[in-house]
Image (tube, rainbow, N blue to C red):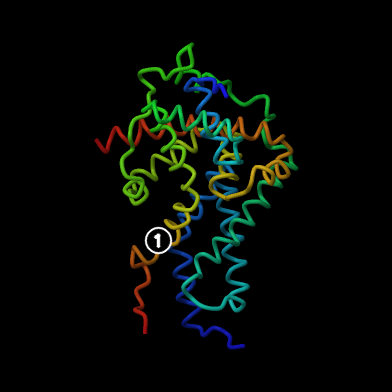
Amino acid sequence: MMIRMMICKEITKLMSRRLDTSLTLQERLALHMHIAMCGACRECNKQFELLHLTGHEYQNLILDTDTASGSSDTPEA
Amino acid sequence: MSASTTEEKNERMQRLAAVRPRLVSFARLQLRDLAQAEDAVQEALIAAMEKNDSFQGRSGYETWVFGILKYKILDSLRAQRRQGSWQPWEDEPDEDAIDRQFKQNGRWEEAARPSSWGDPEAAFVSEHFWRVFDMCMLALPDNTARIFSLRELMGLSTEDICRETGIKENNCWVILHRARLRLRACIERGWLSESS
């Protein structure tokens, strides 16, 4: 099976869509092959993955506020 | 059913006061309006206080309040949409900001080439990272930011986002791709400039 080499801009679309839905086998293969060879896209992929975690981390940040800042001055009994 | 003691209630009130500013920033990223964000948080906090007795256990209190806030944000977004206060989707700024990251042949422009952000864990515990993130979110076009927030901050599926916003799923993926590229470029400028 011939896998067409995709250029960076197209690959970032797959990187993005991968976080929202499942890709076809061919798309996954194209993505992996490209990322294996292209350092910039590898970093971009990591950055997208990091952005994908921001919701969860933002929530942690909110929930940490009072324990981290010690705003509650009444110690636990 | 044991009602919470006054002491417990006071302690919870203090905890709510402590998380309030962060809740407002969170809501603002999505509602794109500070006054509406403050209203949504206010409503969530009032609801939390009213339902105080229905909350059992203490460790997950902020999580519980945060869950209430998410509903309030969704309500406000629906209201915004009903009142027609969203820009038409077609008016969203062009693709320039994205095209600028790539050459004609689809490869990265030298100046836009993604570089390493280091350890994600280190980023997430950095106040500076979150300031940059908030700033870059606020710099996004409103509709793009709303879609990104619904997906990545609220954790809705693209299917649910279609229902909430009336756009097609395909369009949703396109918008998310743009949002991620814009955000990564903006964050890279702000985050690496100071940390290096």
* Viewer-nearest residue: A58 or A38: A38
Position of residue B74 relative to residue B48, above or below, is above
Disc 1 element = helix
Identify which residue is drawn at 62% across, 34% down.
B173
Badge 1 sits on which subunit? A
Seen as rendered, the residue at the extreme front is A1
Determine the image quadrant of residue B133: top left
**Residue B95, percent across and down?**
56, 21
Give the residue type that dot 1 points to.
Answer: Thr
Identify which residue is drawn at 62% across, 52% down.
B73
Q: Write down the residue under mark 1.
A: A65
Identify which residue is drawn at 33% across, 48% down.
B126
Quarter of the C terminus of chain A within the rendering: bottom left
Position of residue B143 relative to residue B73, above or below, is above
Relative placement, left or right, of B131 versus B86 is left
Tally the numbered discs.
1
